[in-house]
Image (cartoon, rainbow, N blue to C red):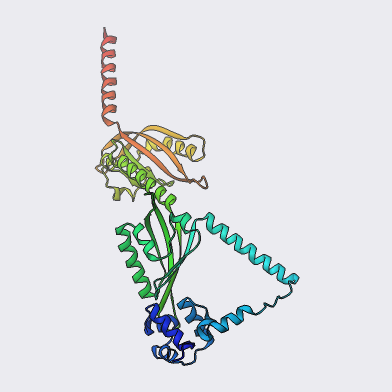
Amino acid sequence: MNENSFAFRLKELLEHKKLTLQAVATALGVSRPAVHKWTRGGEIDYEKLRKLAALLGVNWIWLRYGEEAQQSLAAAAPVELPMTDVRRRYTAEIMESEARMKLAQENARIVTWEWNLITDAVTYSANVEAVYGWPIRRNDDFWPHVPEDDVAMMKKVYEDSIASGRPHEIDFRIVTPIGETRWISSRATPIRDVEGRPVKMIGISMDNTARKRAEEALARSEARFRAIFELASEGIAYIGLDGRWLKANQTLSTILGYSPEELAGLTFQALTLEDDLAENLERLDELLAGEIAMYALEKRFRRQDGRIIWAKVKTSLQRNDASGEPEHLITVIEDISAQREELDALRARVAELEGLLGQR
């Protein structure tokens, strides 16, 4: 076999890069016999030649025609096309578009990447070190910075995505060289050749640390609120603008004698004694109109068992943060039946004593 032949150079490269005929066939979307034919001097079309050269990381002219042909081409004088106004405008538009895209990518801290599933080679955008904290030139540069729990999860997602051909989205953690843990949100999709075989994966990754920390802070805040909501000594409820009980804690269920599920099918109007309802609705209208920020009153409820209780009720309005429109009421209810009984007993005793004094 001639050492200055396409077949010889191809066999040398395959041996040097430890690539099998089947691996090359899979990457290019051709059959294994076709690759074998190339290593025996068979013809190869232009499109396959370019793809083969890219896979092997060499110049396609050198691979097909040899060193002399490549040098001859390099020595040839380039033909300069005249820079017309149309070409100038198109060139300026392309440069401006690329500059905007690069600026947006850097400001959003978005990393683009490509993973060759045949050779395991990876290519990252130039801003990867600014976003991740270290340069990535191969997969071995990446995995040591990912916590073990996330490594297992990510590899499972990649395997499923490659097998199914479907894109995926994942959030994972990285540990920077200075020991800082950061969250990365990644979206990627596998690319298949003409025969449907996966050959590479392309994706984007974004530093999502700020959002994750905000979510964690919100989760902690919501957990504290839930604890306060459930452990409060007073009844607490979210009430719809139409009076429906949207959410109630256990204390309120105890006060009214209804389970939270039973309350969900009722309104506060239905449980309020009719003689006390008019004042309540008047205060509610003022609250919804924005005339007052909250109201407090004492009124009577009818429990599920029919018993009448007195309660101190404080109500405020929750508005939508964006639109300012009313969303629901927040009501705190305290059972004051015992205090009212004591007060009524005291008033009765005072009246009794005043009556005795009037008889003297």
Q: Nearer the viewer, residue 236 or 76?
A: 76
**In what quadrant of the picture does the C terminus appear?**
top left
Where is residue 80? Give x, y as percent. 70, 75
- Image vertical order of residue 319 relative to residue 21, above or below: above
Label total for image: 0
Q: Nearer the viewer, residue 214 or 146?
A: 146
- Outermost residue to the top: 360
Q: Nearer the viewer, residue 98 or 332?
A: 98
- Image vertical order of residue 89 relative to residue 174, above or below: below
Question: Is residue 273 rendered to the left or right of residue 320?
Answer: left
**In what quadrant of the picture does the N terminus appear?**
bottom left
Q: Residue at x 30, y 36 (%)?
A: 234
Residue 350 in sight here: yes
Residue 196 in sight here: no
- Image vertical order of residue 47 relative to residue 338, above or below: below
Where is residue 48? Give x, y as percent. 49, 85
Q: Nearer the viewer, residue 101 or 79?
A: 79
Where is residue 70? Give x, y as percent. 57, 81
- Image vertical order of residue 86 relative to residue 23, above or below: above
Where is residue 330? Give x, y as percent. 39, 41
Q: Residue at x 47, y 59 (%)?
A: 128
